[in-house]
Amino acid sequence: MTVRKLGCTYVRFADGLSENVGRGVSWLTTVLVAVVCYDVFTRYLLKQSYVAVQEMEWHLFALIFLLGAAYTLKHDRHVRVDVFYSRFSPRTKAIVNLAGSILFLVPFCLIGVWGAQTFVKASFTFMETSPDPGGLPFRFLLKAMIPVGFLLVLLQGISLAFTSLATVMGWIDEEGAER
């Protein structure tokens, strides 16, 4: 199998995974809005506040952020300074993306996956829960999403590198169609 065919197969896999996870995670934003509305209603109208509800808000936000980052990368929606990049040709953008993926994104994700292991193992060992009375149990499951999120971004970053390489090599055109 050639590098070109292997790259195409991998890109389809990684892009599909990011798309499916991203679409699934997008539903958590609806849940988050409902939880925040409930929290506001109980806090300001009923004059009651629940620690579990407040923790659920940041748990959902963490899941949206961690698991949605690869989807955001796939759709090129990450925040960046585009002073020069926006004026580059598609080929120059591909060179920048390829270099950035190889030099920064992939190593950073590998460090994130590797570095989170001890943190997550400790959380699972103690079956970590909220330290606050009335807080949520199973905090260790939330912490397990840290390396998962980094892994998803790593997979998508490799896909970006393959796509950028294909653009630089002239294997695909500016719209992503194979030549």
Image (cartoon, grey):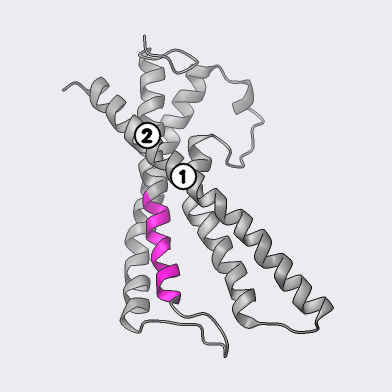
Residue at the farthest bottom position: 133
First of labels 1, 2 by sequence position = 1
Q: Position of residue 64 (x, y in %)?
A: 54, 55
Q: Is residue 140 magenta?
A: yes
Amino acid type for the residue under numbered disc 2: Ser
Q: Residue at x 32, y 60 (%)?
A: 114
Q: Which residue is mark 2?
A: 159
In the foreground, 103 or 167? 167
Q: Residue at x 26, y 20 (%)?
A: 4
Q: Position of residue 176 (x, y in %)?
A: 45, 18
Q: Secondary structure at mark 1?
A: helix
Q: Residues within 10 Å of mark 2 (few under 14, many from 20)?
A: many
Q: Residues within 10 Å of mark 1 (few under 14, many from 20)?
A: many
Residue 70, placed above or below residue 175: below
Q: Secondary structure at mark 2?
A: helix
Q: Quadrant of the N terminus?
A: top left
Q: Residue at x 44, y 47 (%)?
A: 21
Report how far apart the C-alphas of labels 1 and 2 lie in the structure. Answer: 10 Å
Q: Is residue 102 visible?
A: no
Q: Is residue 144 visible?
A: yes
Q: Position of residue 148 (x, y in %)?
A: 38, 57
Main SS class of the magenta portion in the image: helix
Q: Is residue 82 magenta?
A: no
Amino acid type for the residue under numbered disc 1: Ala
Q: Position of residue 26 (x, y in %)?
A: 55, 49
Q: What residue span does the magenta drawing correspond to?
A: 139-151
Q: Which residue is mark 1?
A: 70
**Residue 103 left/right relative to 66:** left
Which disc number belongs to residue 15?
A: none
Q: Which image quadrant for residue 87?
A: top right
